[in-house]
Image: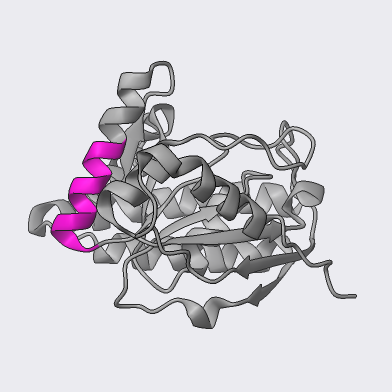
Amino acid sequence: MRSIILYLFIVFCALMLTPILLVCALYNRPEPLFFLGKHAVAVGEVILGLRIEYKGLHRIKKDHRYIFMPNHLSMLDGPLIFKSIPQNVRVILKQGVFRLPVVGQAMKEAHFIPVDRMGKQGGKRAVQKAVFMIKKNNVSFLIFPEGTRSSDGRLQKFRRGGFFMAIDSQTPIVPISIIGTYDLMPRGSYFIKKGKIKIIFHPAISVKEYHHKNMHELIEKVEESINQKEPLSP
């Protein structure tokens, strides 16, 4: 029942989004879209009965740029991380999401970046565009290094796109551990259980010592941080 109420709320938000989207496009100001998006996720948490415990969020400075890299267990992960980051963070998403009515257009206006995962060139273009945006506008990005949701709850092999982005833009990486979302909404499920989630923001990792040739060392360091998970408190 909670999931059905949430989907009805999403439809309501999409209807409310249309006039806001027109104003944002007219004045080229995406800030209201971020405001609406974050508050919609907050309401969604209440509807679903989610209890979220944050750790390490104090480490994130609002005026610094980062590349946030969480593990990926569920469709819940993206919205929850997007809402929790105290910045208007941009996101790299698969191309199909941008075809959603209204929501897809809002993502374009917010300068999210689509990536075509069918070929290497599509990923390369997305990374290059993100690097340009980071350098020009001093913005942060959210990217899931696994590329897709885990099918068994375990951490998958990382893709290199986000690490190219971090090294080429000289932007520190913030590893994030998400715990609990797999049990509440595993891959393939459209219904969400209520329960507890823990999100841990680990210390930022500087990329100054890394380059393309020793990128594997950076990948291992981020993977090690994300694997430093803690059990959910009772």
Q: Can residue 15 be seen in this view?
A: yes
Q: Does the magenta stretch include residue 129?
A: yes
- Residue at the image position 32 percent from the left and 73 percent from the top: 64
In the rendered view of the protein, which quadrant contains the C terminus? bottom right
**In the figure, is residue 128 to the left or right of 96?**
left
Q: How many marks?
A: 0
Residue 214: quarter of image: top left
Residue positioned most to the bottom = 58
Rendered location of residue 19, percent (x, y)? 25, 54
Magenta span: predominant SS is helix
**In the figure, is residue 12 to the left or right of 54?**
left
> In this orientation, which residue lies closer to the viewer: 198 or 204?
204
Determine whether 122 is above or below 25 in the image.
Answer: above
Rendered location of residue 93, percent (x, y)? 42, 38
> In this orientation, which residue lies closer to the viewer: 175 or 31?
175
Magenta stretch bounds:
127-138
Rendered location of residue 21, percent (x, y)? 24, 52
Residue 9: quarter of image: bottom right
- Residue at the image position 32 percent from the left and 23 percent from the top: 122
Determine whether 204 is above or below 21 in the image.
Answer: below
Rendered location of residue 1, percent (x, y)? 77, 51
Q: Is residue 157 magenta?
A: no
Q: Is residue 162 visible?
A: no
- Residue at the image position 27 percent from the left and 45 percent from the top: 130
Residue positioned most to the top = 119
- Residue at the image position 33 percent from the left and 45 percent from the top: 165
Residue 125: quarter of image: top left
